[in-house]
Image: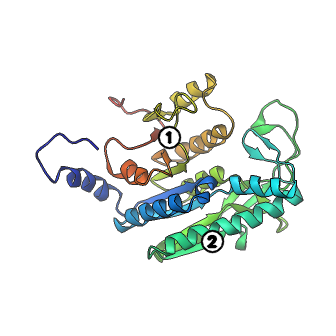
Amino acid sequence: MNVRTTDRYAVLRVAAQYVARFRGALFVLKLSGALSEDPAARSALAEQIRLITDFGIRVLVVHGAGSEIDRECARRGIPVHKIGGRRVTTPTVLEVVRASYRAINQDWVGALAARGLPVVGVSGEEGALLRARPRPRGPMDGSEGEAVSWGAVGDLEAVDVARFKHWLGQGLLTVLAPLTQGPSGETLNCNADTAAAVLAASLKASKLVFLLNVPGLLRSPGDRTTVIPYADLADLAAFEASGMIQDGMIVKTRALESALSAGVESVHLVSGTDPDALVREVFTHEGSGTMIVSRRREGAP
């Protein structure tokens, strides 16, 4: 943060504005599965999460497991089939998904608990925390493409809001693996980005933050220096039409659009590997990644 002033407390004064604004607010953090691969990155991110909770911000974590699932499927010789960033989940793949989520959930619970945070790790299938219907055979998200048999994939229908509010009221930081329970008690796989957006909307979160292995939404994919700092839904539509948003980012785009439309104030795309990116995004004017709002404010860049 560049503050050109002789006021030695300028940084604190700026941060204090955000601390006062967000004290008591709920942030839903979606952690990329790739972040679990690096213990140092996981440790640094856990420390940042501890810091923002120290300032009275309530946090709910949803984590992915995509990289671990891909790696384990490759090890077992199981084909990986994704369409538009969504995983086709056969019974064999579902076994890998459940095991991968269980391991990663334990990793994050351990990292956060090691920093003195009261934390509970859960899976959305437990006690029907997340309830879903099986995704029917058909094209991706209503497109007119070839029909797909998605397997054990669920489309979220309901969230047990009362239980999440209970944990939040108890001061517990919940770490959620986004598996879901189907209508017959079966386990269904759910995209973690989608689950995080539904939870943010259901729990009336102030912010939904996607922690990534890139610094934000990039104007030139692969070029980390081209971060777009601020955008709204109209901008996203133009980016997608231009081909700039592709593959897994399409799923994130649909998720953040739904969260903003449901009343979440802002969505942020932030580096999960930069050791202070989350804190800078939350507590400084400049931020560190990409802030996305429903409609651009007058005078905004």
Q: Position of residue 79 (x, y in %)?
A: 86, 49
Q: Answer left or right for 210 relative to 52.
A: right
Q: Position of residue 228 (x, y in %)?
A: 46, 33
Q: Residues within 10 Å of mark 2 (few under 14, many from 20)?
A: some
Q: Is residue 166 visible?
A: no
CA–CA distance between discs 1 and 2?
27 Å
Q: Which three-letter amino acid code belongs to the residue tagged 2?
A: Gln
112 or 155: which is nearer to us?
Answer: 112
95 or 204: which is nearer to us?
Answer: 95
Residue where numbered disc 1 is placed: 216
At a point 87% along the width and 33% down the height, the residue shown is 146
Q: Which three-letter amino acid code belongs to the residue tagged 1?
A: Gly
Tell me the element at label 1. loop
Tell me the element at label 2. helix
Residue where numbered disc 2 is placed: 106
In the rendered view, tell whether residue 96 sits above or below residue 267: below
At a point 62% along the width and 58% down the height, the residue shown is 37
At a point 72% along the width and 55% down the height, the residue shown is 190
**Quarter of the image containing the N terminus?**
top left
In the rendered view, tell whether residue 10 sits above or below residue 121: above
Q: Answer left or right for 109 relative to 25.
A: right
